[in-house]
Amino acid sequence: GTTLRAAAAEKGRYFGAAVATGKLSDSTYSTVLNREFNSVVAENEMKWDATEPQQGRFSYTGGDRLVSHARANGMSVRGHTLLWHAQQPSWAQGLSGSALRNAAINHVTQVATHFRGQIYAWDVVNEAFADGGSGGRRDSNLQRTGNDWIEAAFRAARAADPGAKLCYNDYNTDGINAKSTGIYNMVRDFRSRGVPIDCVGFQSHLGTTIPGDYQANLQRFADLGVDVQITELDVMTGGNQANIYGTVTRACLAVSRCTGITVWGVRDCDSWRGSDNALLFDCAGNKKAAYTSVLNAL
Ligand code: XIL
């Protein structure tokens, strides 16, 4: 294939980008997006603060716009994210205990129901594990409602949209380390107890190096019987950027249950990482060396 989407499709994978729907009217942006990508995820517009700005009052404008753009352009949609400690509406930040638990589960049910049938995979829970050596959960208002909040969220999501793959998504999980092993143990436990989980997302916000066991880490999760996906890939600029992009792409292709790769934005100027110039296209929409490295690896 001569585009990322065509080359990925030939390998039975998708190639996606995070989108801010406000940029779809920028023709440089949408030309690259529609030509190169066959999967999209909302960079912000399906998060809790965006979809339920006041308790019980839901707002789907941005999410619906993205879904219709995807449908019109032959793209699948990743849903990001139902529950997360960050980007919560202020009303949720002020809740705790059973009031927060009930609000959180209601949020999962309402949002997953609204988008039912339109989402390929949902990041049901995002970033719930701690950094560092503990391998344990991150402290958050959601965690303080009880350790079972994650499985409750997955059960609610399955009930609301039985057709969506349900993922756990996190960062700093790019090799075999204490954090990724903590997540691995949770997924293994969920599978053994019948808690509905179908996939694990590896954000892959990378610096100037990539762990040597990146592929082995994906494979150990796949061996638990779940799909794996690269969900928010971006790589700090520098001599290794193109090589690292190629290494990630080859790792996904080498793991049969790695179903696709998403980069966290289209052009360098769209990236949350600012001066890192972390993406595949420059600000004018030109292909970078990192693009060629990905395309050649596919
Ligand atoms: C980022 C967005 O890119 C920014 O626009 C926003 O201000 C903050 O969130 N991990 C995630 C994503 O799961 O949702 C984050 O997206 C980047 C880190």
Image (tube, grey):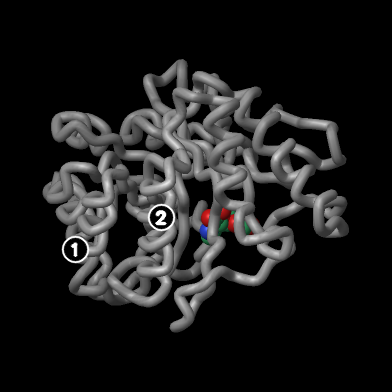
The crowd level at tag 2 (other Cα within 10 Å; few <14, some 14-19, many 20+) is few
Q: Name the residue that disc number 1 marks.
A: 216
- The N terminus appears in which quarter of the rendering? top left
Report the mark closest to the observer, 1 or 2. 2
Element at label 1: helix
Q: Nearer the viewer, residue 226 or 11?
A: 226
Q: Nearer the viewer, residue 78 or 139?
A: 139
Looking at the rendered structure, the kind of residue marked 2 is Asp
Q: Earlier in the sequence, mark 1 or mark 2?
A: 2
* Residue in the picture at 17% in, 49% down: 255
- The C terminus appears in which quarter of the rendering? top left
Cα gap from disc 1 to disc 2, whole angstroms: 20 Å
Q: Is residue 211 left or right of residue 28?
A: left
Q: Quadrant of residue 172?
A: bottom left
Q: Residue furthest front?
A: 193
Q: Give residue 58's position: percent from left, percent from top.
A: 78, 31
